[in-house]
Amino acid sequence: MVMRERWIIPMLILLMISSCSLGLPSFPKMNNASRPIATKPSAQPKAVKTNFQSCDPKNLPLSEGIPSVPPTPIYNSSVPYPNNTMRSLADQLNLYIGAAGDARQYSNIEYVKLLTHEFNMVAVENAMKWHIIHPEPDIYDFSRGDALVAFAKIYDLAVYGHVLVWDYAYPTWVTETSRTRDEWIQLLCEHIKTVTSHYQGQIYAWDVVNEAFNNDGSLRNTLWMQKIGPEYVAMAFQWAREADPNAHLILNDHFAEGMNSKSEAIYSLAKGLLMDGVPIDGVGMQMHLLLWGPPTTEELLMNMKRLSDLDLDVHITEMDLRMNLSSESSKVKTDAQTDTYRRVFDSCLAVPRCKVFVTWGLTDKYSWIPDYTGYPDTPLLFDENFQPKPAYYEIMKLLQEQFQ
């Protein structure tokens, strides 16, 4: 996310259940259309080329008191899986449509049904951020992340991992301890490799480095920039690939969706990393947008295509569209929001290497924006009552058109 959290979600305590007794739901295969469908190509994650010193992941006990167990399935395999949903259509196109969330909601049957019927990916909203997953120097708490991954397995959802390196959400033991440069390198390396190896083979893609740039295209003076230098970016990708050979490794940022100084800097960095043999697999466009001023379709397509030409995937990683800063009528705002979602999703469909489209929250009720701004907002595809909004129907229409 763009902004620092103001609060930490209480831990969710889940009942331990043996996976062999879960009665996991089996989703029937969708019938293929009568004509060939233009699916997205599947790129192989790039191999590591070792350039920097490495480390071994830590083998430490989990924090006590919160079991890392799968949640109870709240409906069984006898429940029919809907055919006419975003998920059913995206599955046939080799496209991931996801929503960010947290295991604390998985006891809500409305939430689970909407998520598992309409989406084939869940993004990790908070559970894998440093202050939650690595709260003390010698403690890793994977409980919330494990619960989310277990849930995803039950309902056959891909998992989008967030986040390995960011400049926010650190516990004080990280930021308030004096270290040499080599010790900072060792700390970052051990964190990345411990977390990534714990989830090896279970994460489709990782936001490896998040929000590394200022809007003017310069590298932000992050903690890691100060303590290690600009090479921390390449180091992070190397260590993540060493720990998981198959996850897609992503450079993620915001306000760089169109053509501007920031997107130019991201393009140049990605190109340079590839030339140096750094295993970067794609660029994430967060797509946290305001109602007025989103990138034009032309600029968005231009940016996506030039990244694709580098043999990189392009992911829409955190889309929402804030409405509360506009004074226009409700209809005008809704029409503008609908049009923006339509244009962004249509652009993704037009670019073969755009294979992930994630909204930052499942419904307006679970958006991070009201908690941050203190004002109600309606930024997502589903309203507070879990009902689809006009933007949802536009996305459905675009998906259905792929089969005509």
Image (cartoon, rainbow, N blue to C red):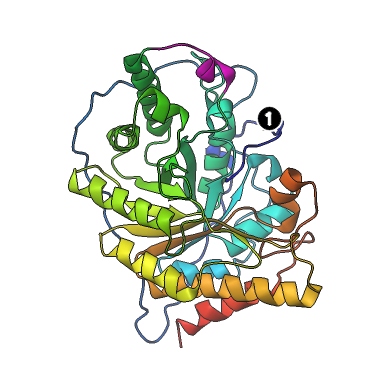
Residue 300 falls left or right of residue 52: right
- Name the residue nearer the viewer: 253 or 40: 253
Q: Residue at x 57, y 26 (%)?
A: 131
- Report whether residue 68 is seen: no
**Total numbered labels:** 1
Residue 9 falls left or right of residue 352: right
Corner quadrant of residue 342: bottom right
As drawn, 15 above or below 258? above
Q: Residue at x 30, y 52 (%)?
A: 268
Q: Which residue is mark 1?
A: 11
Q: Residues within 10 Å of mark 1 (few under 14, many from 20)?
A: few
Position of the N terminus, as image quadrant, is top right
Corner quadrant of residue 276: top left
Give the amino acid at mark 1: Met
What x and y, as percent, mark residue 76?
64, 54
Q: Mark 1 falls on what kind of element?
A: loop
Q: Is residue 66 magenta?
A: no
What x and y, as percent, mark residue 47?
21, 44
What x and y, as percent, mark residue 68?
57, 29
What x and y, as percent, mark residue 83?
57, 73
Q: Residue at x 39, y 47 (%)?
A: 251
Corner quadrant of residue 221: top left
As drawn, 141 above or below 284? above
- Report whether residue 45 is seen: yes
Residue 269 falls left or right of residue 332: left
Q: Residue at x 37, y 36 (%)?
A: 200
Q: Which residues are magenta?
A: 171-179
As drawn, 210 above or below 225? below
- Name the residue nearer the viewer: 181 or 342: 181
Query: Of all residues shown, which one is farthest toward the front?
Result: 216
Q: Is residue 172 magenta?
A: yes
Residue 343 falls left or right of residue 234: right
